[in-house]
Image: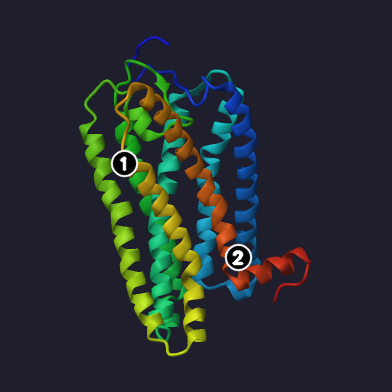
């Protein structure tokens, strides 16, 4: 492709694992199976939270949103990844790249906010059980979920709008499986300091603030649980938030691992690290959405019972 500026760029080339064709076939099968599990697991969770009236509560409403978000997040990128594994030289148009970046960025930011909303729900349920029905009524928790989607979409719109205005006049090969925004910004032939600052501020708002909020919520939750006199009461209280806490630890733990590990200074080591970074990012994008329904099913008796009823074709309460 000839060098061009942003207005004449026809598309980008997604490098992926094109230099390791044997791995591509293996990862195609693996990622496809994981994607199918994501669709099935999260689809079942959405279905049971809709069909079982006993699950029409704030916690399960947020859980249904999380499952729908995971389906949207993976669907915005995994089909592109799978297609790339089967195509020797995968190209993507500039507009399609921008749309994919917007969707992935929006879903990631929305999940951060949504996990914070879910922590507040658990805080109210355990620390203020008498006020919980009044505070977490439908007129409150539905706008809370909607605001998380709007906030994630607005943030993504700002970041992607700044990115697509940059001129791209050099190499058009993206060293990634998808249009990952940091990989795309590396191809710009202009100053990206505004983009870096904007993304830094967004990371503080959508990563830092929710983490602090979740941490504060669980400090109060654990303090309240430890004050419960009976062991059975403590177990029951902790079981209501253990699934959410597990998801939070896996989600943010993986993020910290991805962006906190040191970079290799050796050229050969850097090449190997590029491959490992891409694979870690890929599995981060499919592993967490795949684990979420499993965690909530195994650690939640209500979901487990409803799934069993669905499988055995029992009637749901009217």
Report the coloring of the rendering.
Answer: rainbow
Q: Position of residue 99 (x, y in %)?
A: 45, 35
Q: At x 52% / y 63%, what residue is drawn? A: 63
Return the x and y of residue 130 as percentages of the image width and height.
42, 87
Name the quarter where the N terminus is drawn.
top left
Q: Secondary structure at mark 1?
A: helix
Q: Which mark is residue 298?
A: 2
Callout 2: 10 Å neighbours few (<14), some, many (20+)?
A: few
Residue 57 lies, in percent from the top left, at 53, 73
Q: Is residue 142 above or below residue 91?
A: below
Q: Residue furthest toward the bottom? A: 229
Number of the front mark, 1 or 2: 2
State the residue position of label 1: 158
Q: Is residue 146 visible?
A: no
Q: Is residue 230 left or right of residue 42?
A: left
The spot of residue 127 in percent (x, y) is 38, 81
């Amino acid at each position: 492709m000839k060098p061009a500026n942003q207005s004449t760029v026809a598309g980008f080339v997604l490098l992926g694992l094109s230099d390791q064709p044997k791995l591509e076939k293996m990862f195609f099968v693996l990622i496809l199976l994981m994607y199918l599990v994501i669709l099935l697991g999260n689809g079942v969770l959405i279905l049971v939270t809709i069909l079982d009236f006993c699950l029409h509560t704030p916690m399960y409403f947020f859980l249904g949103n999380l499952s729908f978000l995971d389906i949207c997040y993976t669907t915005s990128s995994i089909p592109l990844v799978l297609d790339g594994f089967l195509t020797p030289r995968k190209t993507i148009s500039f507009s399609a790249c921008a749309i994919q970046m917007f969707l992935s960025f929006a879903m990631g930011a929305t999940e951060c906010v949504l996990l914070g909303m879910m922590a507040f729900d658990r805080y109210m349920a355990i620390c203020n059980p008498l006020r919980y029905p009044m505070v977490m009524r439908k007129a409150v928790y539905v706008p809370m979920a909607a605001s998380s989607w709007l906030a994630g979409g607005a943030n993504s719109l700002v970041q992607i709008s700044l990115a697509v205005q940059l001129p791209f006049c050099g190499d058009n090969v993206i060293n990634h499986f998808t249009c990952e925004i940091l990989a795309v910004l590396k191809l710009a032939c202009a100053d990206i300091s505004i983009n870096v600052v904007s993304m830094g501020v967004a990371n503080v708002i959508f990563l830092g603030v929710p983490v602090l909020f979740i941490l504060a919520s669980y400090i109060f939750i654990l303090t309240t649980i430890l004050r419960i006199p009976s062991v059975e009461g403590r177990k029951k209280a902790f079981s209501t938030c253990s699934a959410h806490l597990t998801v939070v630890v896996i989600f943010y733990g993986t993020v910290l691992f991805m962006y906190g590990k040191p970079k290799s200074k050796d050229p050969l080591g850097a090449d190997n690290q590029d491959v490992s970074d891409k694979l870690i990012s890929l599995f981060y994008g499919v592993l967490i959405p795949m684990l979420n329904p499993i965690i909530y099913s195994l650690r939640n008796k209500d979901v487990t019972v409803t799934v069993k009823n669905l499988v055995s074709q029992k009637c749901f309460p009217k």
